[in-house]
Image (tube, rainbow, N blue to C red):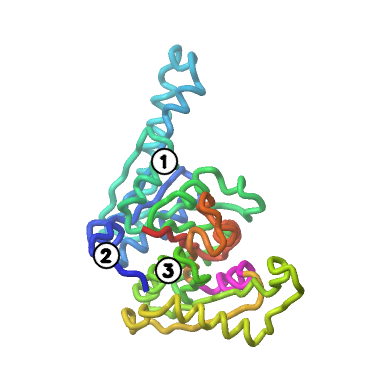
Amino acid sequence: MTAQHNDDPHRLASAAVVVGVDGSEAADLAVRWAAETASQRHRRLHIVEGIDLTASASAFGAYDVIEPSVIDAIRRLGADRVSAARRLALEVDPNLDVETEVSEANPARLLIDRSRTAHLLAIGAAGEGGTLSHLGSTLLAVAAHGHGAVVVVRDTGTEQQTRCTGPVVLGVDGSQVSDAAAAAAFAESSERGTQLVAVHSWNDLYLDRVAGVPYTIPDRDAEAAGEAIIAEQLAGWQEKYPNVEVIRRVYLTGPRQPLLELSKSAQLVVVGSRGRGGFRGLLLGSTSNFLVQRAHCPVMVVHPN
């Protein structure tokens, strides 16, 4: 169990739920999810859009000197989008404290900066996620470089992303980053009054790849090792959150498919930003990348403080 600091900015009562918007249907879904979360936790909702005016001005170049209303129109569009998002949030809770912000900054940089002090940051994603580029550079940059918890609310074409029943699912791999994910998952399960399903997927069965000799860990030993990893990762958290029922599962496969399958009935899947074996410069691991593309519920990517 990692020590929790009272000065954690993400846990302060003043920390808002932040959501990034861009006028898309996926962003609207993220706004609804963020508004529900802010309402349930009695927190402010901060709706943000970055219009990247520098890039726009560069793209339009001399044309804007002749027709300056182009840049003005971009500003108005940003204002209209956050106003529409505010109305959508107030449909969720008319008494919600909502503030809006339109910035001329790059949207990814803006959201990463706002995540520093956010309770959590939500961003929408659309489509089936066949490639990383399909998700958009802003989402990937924020998921990889954000601070605290970044929640990717995927639009899969149904209403199941806003599911308010089912467990919170936690991916456990024994890494330091996974410690932060465990803390967030217990807090989320407690807030939601639901079970926590802690999943470890043992994908190091074939040691001959590194040892140079054929050797396979017996299934029973792998299961026991997985149970031990889960126990160590969760040590202390069940004492802090006695109201959270924990279910432990060990799979003798890679982590992607078990977590994807569990996302079909979960409220939320929680993973660390980079798992065991991740390279130092790789801020979003392969499992996190896979889930933000394909999961059937919101995915919380947790970055250590």
The crowding category of the residue bearing disc 2, from other C-alpha atoms within 10 Å (few below 14, some 14 to 19, many at least 20), is few
Local SS, label 2: loop
Quadrant location, the N terminus: bottom left
Percent across and percent down for residue 250 are 58, 80
Q: Which residues are magenta?
A: 255-266
Question: In the displayed structure, would residue 57 be above or below residue 132?
Answer: above
* Residue type indicated by callout 3: Asp
Q: Is residue 259 magenta?
A: yes
Within-10-Å neighbours for mark 3: few <14, some 14–19, many 20+: many
Crowd rating for badge 1 (residues with CA inside 10 Å; few <14, some 14–19, many 20+): some
Q: Which residue is mark 3?
A: 179
User: Which residue lies at the image location 29% right of the left edge and 55% below the top edge?
Assistant: 16
Whether residue 19 is visible to the viewer of this picture, yes or no, is: yes
Amino acid at the residue labelled 2: His
x then y, percent, for residue 23: 46, 43
The reply to whether the C-beta atoms of the residues labelled 2 and 1 are less than 8 Å apart is no
Name the residue carrying label 1.
109
Query: Could you tell me which residue is drawn at 75 percent across and 72 percent down?
Result: 213
